[in-house]
Image (cartoon, rainbow, N blue to C red):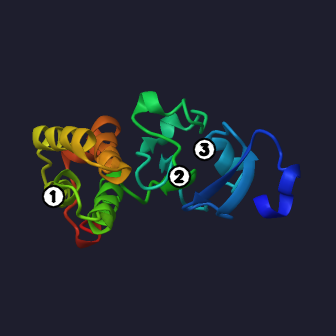
Amino acid sequence: MVCVAGPAWPQGAALVLGVGPCAPAGVHLAPAGITVRELIDEYCGGMLDGHTFYAYLPGGASGGILPASMGNIPLDFDTLQPHGCFIGSAAVVVLSDHDSAVAAARNLMHFFRHESCGQCTPCRVGTAKALDLIRRPQWDLPALEDLSAVMRDASICGLGQAAPNPIDCVIRYFPHELQAVPNRPEAQA
């Protein structure tokens, strides 16, 4: 779209990717600072029938996971940081009540483990260890908190530093899911 618009690109606009159980999902030209609720309702046509907005990833895989109750936070660079998240790629992923934040975190950590280049130990070992810990029916919260701190502080690149975000967000915003963590194969990623 930038190539098509050239210098006529609207000031204060951003490309936002909205995916999930909303129709139509896709790349939308939206104003910077739009909320996820506005994105879903005004640009994506609302949630699909039979789905209720449950949670969202505001900035792609490493941007964290927030509950729907925080869906009125503007999607911008400085607004998400106090909540442990960031806009990142602006690839907003919407989760419905048919999804779980625990399953999303497992899937994301599987991705990070696979994508780690292996150069630094905190990321290479940390993503594998984190995945092992969150695949268990009961999460070892003190171990995960220590591992997150080490990965953030000692990883060389942004992947290792941001990989713990989904796990940290599940612990912070979805503790009810940790009471009875599903141990189904589809949630194991």
Q: Return the residue nearer the eye: 7 or 162.
A: 7
Q: Which residue is mark 3?
A: 36
**Residue 54 in view (yes/no):** yes
Q: Name the residue located 20 percent from the left edge and 60 percent from the top edge.
A: 124
Kind of residue indicated by mark 3: Val
Identify the residue position indicated by label 1 in the image.
125
Q: Is residue 151 left or right of residue 96?
A: left
Residue type highlighted by circle 2 = Thr
Q: Nearer the viewer, mark 2 or mark 3?
A: 3
The residue shown at (42%, 31%) is: 83
Q: Residue at x 12, y 50 (%)?
A: 138
Give the mark nearest the N terminus, 2 or 3: 3
Alpha carbons under labels 1 and 2: distance apart: 37 Å
Categorize mark 1 by other alpha carbons within 10 Å: few (<14), some (14-19), many (20+). Answer: some
Of helix, strand and loop, which one carries label 1? helix
Distance from label 3 to label 1 (Cα)? 34 Å
Please give left or right for residue 8 compared with residue 70 in the image.
right
| Location of mark 2 (residue) | 52
Residue 65 left/right relative to 22: left
Q: Determine whether label 3 and label 1 are within 8 Å by CB.
A: no
Q: Which mark is residue 87?
A: none
Q: Amino acid at mark 1?
A: Val
Q: Residue 142, how many percent across, how many down? A: 11, 37
